[in-house]
Image: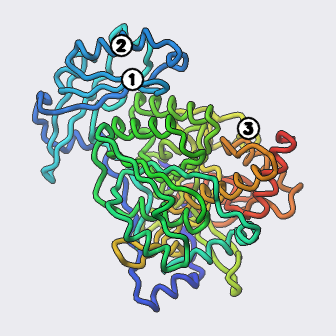
Amino acid sequence: MKIPVALLVAVLGLSACQGAAEQTGRTTPFPIAKPPPTLAQAIARAADLGPAGSSTTVSLDFGLKADQPAAPAPIERAVATLDDAGLSGSWRTPSSLITADGPAPAAAALLHVRIETYRMASGSTFYATIDSPTLPATLAAVASDVSGLDNYRRSRSYAIRAGGLTPADVVTYYNLKPLRDAGLDGAGQTILFPEIDDLPNLSDVEKFASEFGLPPFAPILTVKRDASWGTPMKPEGETVLDLEIAHAIAPGAKLVVYLAAGDFGHSDRAFDQMVTDHLGSIISESLGSCEPDTPGGARNVYATIQDRAIARHMSHFVASGDNGAFTCGLDQDPAGSFPSTLPTVTAVGGTSVFESEQGVYFKEYAWSSPLDQAGSGGGASAFYSEPDYQKNETSALGHGERQVPDVAADGDPSTGFHIVFQGRDAQVGGTSAATPVWAATIALINQDVKKKGLREVGFANPALYWMGDNLPKFNPKPFHDVTSGNNLGYIAAPGWDFATGWGSMDAVGLDAAWARYLKTGGG
């Protein structure tokens, strides 16, 4: 049964930033993109051109079992099997992946599947298989899953382009200013960004820095590419907005972008290299796909890499999606966005913000725009059990599964952020904008707790839920509890909820609570 769309939220007024946008003639928000068809729907609507030929190159990733990186000999035998099959296999310690590229017929024969080519009505083509792969014995001995058997699915960037909150507004609204005034700017921290849309030059980000008196990007920004990661899409604004929002909050932090194609096979390779390089301890990811339509092999391969990120004490924030409780579409059952549904990441939802006349925090609502079929992604996972840190927040609607989101920040395009894209001032929203707010705030907190002789944040959820479960003990409180609004399927309520998690941050309260958590071990 599908959950009906929740009650509409009355429009109470426009933010000061939106009014400013109208006065200066800046562009208006673009509509949120509706979810693309599932693979099954795409195949049903496409023309089947028959088996993919040798001119079609597939890029496969085999996720290693947890104990395999320490046993290279069996891995080398698996790589030899791939080479013998006509594919180009590769593995380098300490990677979580064996990669293989080669002609589709060779991959199909090796894995006992039929890989077909399909043509959409638009004329674009993709390859895919609906068969379950069977791994040869040498591969099955070391790898549990394979991804990359189709190139139809594209990770979606959760952003819309469209004045908005300036860097000074953001710093004031979420009470970041006292931290910045205390000298915390993210220096010594590095934020990592997996991205699928290109950043051909730095003109937009440098214009943004100049416009708001921030340090230039050139000395602190690194963009990484690799042919084995595929070709990213043309600039869509996602990479620009992630960088600009993070830089507004933590202007001293280094920023590293890993650019890849949006299919699972290529993007997993870039993610794996990001964890291997470990150039920084904070990941901000504004990408995702309909969880039920994400192949099990792709989910498991990604989860294996993320487990390694946790072991390396990396904080990973992921956008929860922009279609409310219906990430796969209103014609589908309620569903979450992968990888935000993984229990090992911190999922970030979206709010609508309202400033006081003084420009400081007034209130927030869960972001919901029924006419656009847009809102804060949230709900229960279809695959992952409820983690221990959520046991006190068990919802009957969660059915014992992982519950999303964990936290939230401004995501409503109507109350969004000021950025520069394609040389123009623009206003952005989406959980993709909320995610770098949290990632950059953690850069300030990491800088502070290290000064106090404490360890960095690492996996954030155990601490966040400890804070939420002990809110009465904190003054100021680490979160703004969002108790109004909905996400098209679930209503915001006191405490944790499916629309906004614990809510947005009060940065001063969050910083103090984190130091207390680290000093006491969560006691």
**Residue at image location 29% in from the left, 12% down from the top:** 81
Looking at the image, which is closer to me, 332 or 108? Answer: 108
Q: Read off the residue under disc 2.
A: 78
- Asked if 317 appears above or below 240 in the picture, the reply is above
**If you read the primary sequence from the N terminus, does the residue marked by circle 1 or circle 3 appear first?**
1
Frontmost of labels 2 and 3 is: 2
Asked if the residue under mark 3 is in contact with the one under mark 2, i.e. CB atoms within 8 Å, the reply is no
**Callout 1, which amino acid?**
Trp
- Asked if 307 appears above or below 471 in the picture, the reply is above
Asked if the residue under mark 1 is in contact with the one under mark 2, i.e. CB atoms within 8 Å, the reply is yes
Label 2's element? helix
Quadrant in which residue 312 is drawn: top right
Crowding around mark 1 (Cα neighbors within 10 Å: few <14, some 14 to 19, many 20+) is: some
**Callout 2, which amino acid?**
Ala
Q: Read off the residue under disc 3.
A: 391
Q: CA distance from mark 2 to mark 1?
A: 10 Å
Label drawn at residue 91: 1
**If you read the primary sequence from the N terminus, does the residue marked by circle 2 or circle 1 appear first?**
2
Crowding around mark 2 (Cα neighbors within 10 Å: few <14, some 14 to 19, many 20+) is: many
